[in-house]
Image (cartoon, rainbow, N blue to C red):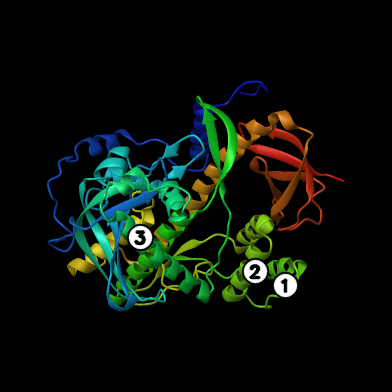
Amino acid sequence: MSSRSTPVGHEDLAAIARDAMIERGLLPEFSPAVLAETRTLDASPARRDAPAGSARDLTHLPWSSIDNDDSRDLDQLTVAEALAGDVVRLLVAIADVDGLVKAGSATDGHAAANTTSVYTAARIFPMLPERLSTDLTSLNEEQERLAMVIDMTIAADGSVVESEVYGAWVRSRAKLTYNGVAAWLDGLAPAPDKLAAVPGLDDQLRLQDRIAQALLRQRRQRGALGLATPQARPVFDKGVLIDLQPDEKNRAKELIADFMIAANGATARFLESKRFPSLRRQLHAPRRWERIVQLAAGLGERLPDEPSAPALEAFLAKQRQADPGGFGDTSLAVVKLLGSGEYMVAPAGEPGGMHFGLAVSDYTHSTAPNRRYPDLITQRLVKAALAGEAAPYGEDELAALARHCTAQEDNAAKVERQVRKAAAAVLLRPRIGERFRAVVTGASDKGTWVRIGTPTAEGRVVQGFEGLDVGDKPEVELVAVDVARGFIDFRRAR
């Protein structure tokens, strides 16, 4: 794999990913105990006991999922109903993972150790065994499944005026994809076959699109940030890596994202109303706000001296309109300066802290329990609250879980980034000595990093980094790569 001419494929990158996971304290494989436990689970469609007693039967509704083309771990279904006066009822169904993954089981132990699925360029390392995440606890097409439903009433202006949470039986009518739905919504392609095959589903999705647009407008008015930072997606030909391409946002992705934000907010408010503690997802006001102010000033705009999400979003909206081609670099710089989110505990009956990027203060993670352990924790809290039972986690225990989940999420992100950089290093090996336009994505005592666009890749500036800061756009020269370690080294071109 060290030879310049040796092709690199799935297996090579998967081996790098596995080693990186072990190095970061993540478990790349399931133990024999987990696999044995999974084999004993009942695969029959017989109805299990619902949370908090009997569940509602909502299998008659035209539920559908929208996810990536290759996704098989389907956590959510959505459906909407128009009410009087432009009010809409939106229902989000979340897979009941706790029904089969019991606290204290070997499977739960593995999930608690990793806390997240790890999505690398060559292999997915799921948080739960595939027999669960892609079958028994996945909301698959034409399969009757138990789910937790967040039922919201949304006004014409996008405000959630009422919500409730309950258990229900659901059945998906269609497994749809982001790309197919987005192209159809934008008028660029006919309705996907699965959409066209379900009578009325086209009107259903247009109604959902209208709701999503209203939710987004309402959040933007509060200061939610409209950022564009696509990750690199590997392209393989007959198992050999040939390219890295940006995985862009689209209208269908934004639709689902807006619904999940609304559902997470409703879930947080439900737990608060029941005087239960909860895990909240927070993003503090940026510590390097002064650098964001400097970047805005360099583009002829003025931001206040103190962090303001509405002011920052107004600036971003203006840049998105004025310079669409350069907005990606501006957006990336702002994302890096915002920093990372973290999990925190909201004590019983108290509101959580602010999520600066989403401009919300009541926000948990609850909508992806097949993929994220905090969502499974939240599901257990919700089910206990519905049943009138005591909270299954105390505040001290939740605080420890919050710290652990934050740390493991960071480790997973580092693994994913290392494998992306390893893939990029493969493509860049023949280009040593070439110059690239770059944007600085990190600058600290630990080093200075830049991202280039073709291929989308991030590397370290090992020479000439003095004076560079996040958002600067130097020209850099590629000086070395190391595929196995995911190293890409540049020097500043003079």
Judge left or right: residue 25 versus residue 490: left
In this rendering, does residue 453 appear at all?
A: yes
Q: CA distance from mark 3 to mark 2?
A: 33 Å
Residue holding disc 2: 318
Q: CA distance from mark 1 to mark 3?
A: 38 Å
Which numbered mark, 3 or 2, is in the foreground of this view? 2
Residue 376 versus residue 419 in the image, above or below: below
Q: Earlier in the sequence, mark 2 or mark 1?
A: 1
What is the x, y in percent for residue 286? 61, 68
Which numbered mark, 1 or 3, is in the foreground of this view? 1
Q: Residues within 10 Å of mark 2 (few under 14, many from 20)?
A: some
**Quarter holding residue 58:** bottom left
At horizontal 57% and vertical 73% (from top left) the residue drawn is 309
Q: CA distance from mark 2 to mark 1?
A: 9 Å
Q: Earlier in the sequence, mark 1 or mark 3?
A: 1
At horizontal 35% and vertical 58% (from top left) the residue drawn is 205
